[in-house]
Image: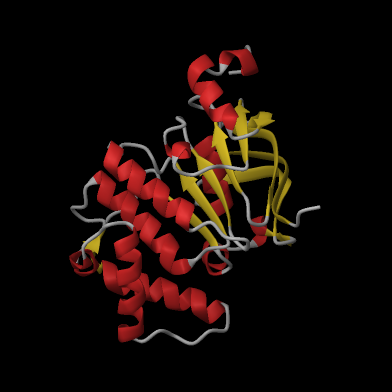
Amino acid sequence: MSEMLLEIKDLHARVAGGAEILKGLSLSLPVGEVHAIMGPNGSGKSTLSYVLAGREGYEVTSGSVLYRGEDLLAMSIDERARAGVFLAFQYPVEIPGVQNGYFLRAILNARRAHLGLPELNPVEFMKRAKEALQMVKLDASMLKRSVNEGFSGGEKKRNEVMQMALLEPTLSVLDETDSGLDIDALRVVGQGVEALKGPARSALIITHFPRLLEHVTPHKVHVLSAGRVVHTGEASLARELEERGYEWLIGGER
């Protein structure tokens, strides 16, 4: 039996003071596996990613989330990040005035400190950063620009995957990383995510369409509707959903 990295049980959550969005969602993610989450608009996909990352403005009303056997919901945002939880945003935030290279080195060294590893000096960091840049086909000049400021959509998403390559998170949650990408950028991002697979790392890929999954092969595909998982299948389910839509699975649950 596979060791579970993430165990979500009967999770109920809402926007603070608003209507419930997650309505009894349960999902298990074994160590070393990549699972895709698909579903129609409003099914709770992005809300799930925000709850896992600890984003402010969302309230968990009941249920539990165990990460490596520990209560993820009891951790602060920075504790989750240091413990290896990484969220790739659908709309990456711009941080004017903060140089991308300094930002990446700071978060990498914070992660290393949590793991009991020594800090990387600027030379050591640059060596690793250049390797990550090459993987996502970005120029080294990106390190001198402010975080995501003036980046194209494709550059922002590639920058997120570069962060993943540097941090080597235990759990990566990709919230519609394929959104807004052209064919070439989609291939680079997908191949980057596929290259980061490993026996000690797991990922949840949230997507509307199976295009990204042509480059990243998931172990399982979960379909969300009305705030809960209504069906789980193999990787081939993504293509079937593109051909048939969601109605045959969810009926009137939307």
Q: Residue at x 55, y 22 (%)?
A: 240
Residue 36 in the image: state x and y as whole percent. Answer: 56, 39
Residue 95 in the image: state x and y as whole percent. Answer: 27, 60
Residue 2 in the image: state x and y as whole percent. Answer: 76, 54
Which of the pair 152/199 is nearer the observer?
A: 199
**Colour mode of the rendering:** secondary structure
Is residue 28 left or right of 15 when viewed as pictured?
Answer: right
Is residue 14 left or right of 212 when viewed as pictured?
Answer: right
Say which quarter of the image contains residue 136. bottom left
**In this rendering, does residue 16 appear at all?**
no
Say which quarter of the image contains residue 10. top right
Is residue 201 left or right of 92 when viewed as pictured?
Answer: right
Which of the pair 94/4 is nearer the observer?
A: 4
Position of the C terminus by quadrant: top right
Q: Residue at x 52, y 64 (%)?
A: 81
Residue 54 in the image: state x and y as whole percent. Answer: 55, 54
Relative to 11, does residue 226 appear above or below in the rendering?
above
